[in-house]
Amino acid sequence: MILILGVTASGKGRLAFDLAKILGAEIISIDSMKVYRRMDIGTAKPSRQARARVKYHLIDIVEPSDSFSVGSFLDAAEDAIKSINNRKREIIAVGGTALYIKALLYGLFEGPGSDKRIRTELRARAQAEGLAKLHHELSVIDPVAAERISPNDA
């Protein structure tokens, strides 16, 4: 797999397209916004003409009203990789969504899932007591995590 990564408007998409034409490769998008249908303004999705010449994956796959998490991305990316590998084609993965890139390269945290009851309770406490108090509690329980997480992150 060839990875083309970088910041917005750095020419990643054009490079991936040109390289895919040369190599006969397929492209997997690593972009958190290109997955949404009809979200075309500001996303720099490949044109219909480009998509007719090169096979793209993970573009226009969900409705804007649908939830799409990093886990959803990873599942879809792994399916695309298997499909492309089955066709014995080269893969070019291109994008700049850091969380998706990290998940693709290293996988996801495999601990217990989220607990809605606890999340609801903590949100209520944050509203009532403030984030600083919760962050202080975190610093007592897990100082390493507290050091990494800003007291302003909700």
Image (cartoon, rainbow, N blue to C red):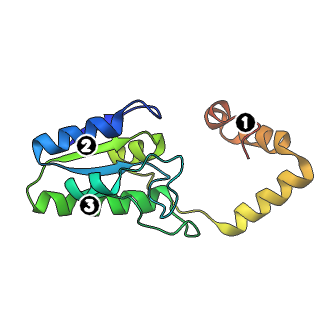
Q: CA distance from mark 2 to mark 1?
A: 47 Å
Q: Give the structural element (helix, strand or loop) at label 3.
A: helix
Query: Considering only order in the chain, which callout, 3 or 2, is on the residue closer to the N terminus?
Result: 2
Residue type at mark 3?
A: Ala
Tell me which numbered mark, 3 or 1, is placed earlier along the sequence: 3
The part of the image, by quadrant, that contains residue 120 is: bottom right
Dots 2, 3 in contact, CB < 8 A: no
Alpha carbons under labels 3 and 1: distance apart:
41 Å
Q: Residue at x 40, y 48 (%)?
A: 103
The tally of labels here is 3
Of labels 2 and 3, the one closer to you: 2
Q: Nearer the viewer, residue 123 or 102?
A: 102
Q: Which residue shows up at 76% across the image and 36% down it?
A: 151
Quadrant containing the N terminus in the rendered view? top left
| Label 2, residues with CA under 10 Å away: few <14, some 14-19, many ≥20 | many
Q: Residues within 10 Å of mark 3 (few under 14, many from 20)?
A: some
In this view, 104 is above or below 4: below
Tell me where residue 75 appears, x and y as whole percent: 36, 62
The amino acid sitting under disc 2 is Phe
The image shows residue 154 at horizontal and vertical percentages of 74, 47
Above or below: residue 9 compared with residue 79 = above
Quadrant of the rendered image containing residue 82: bottom left
Residue 17 badge? 2
Residue 139 numbered mark, or none: 1
Most extreme residue toward the left is: 88
Q: Amino acid at mark 1?
A: Ser
The reply, left or right, for residue 142 in relation to residue 74 is: right
Label 2 residue SS: helix
Left/right placement of residue 82 relative to residue 146 reads: left
> Mark on residue 80?
3
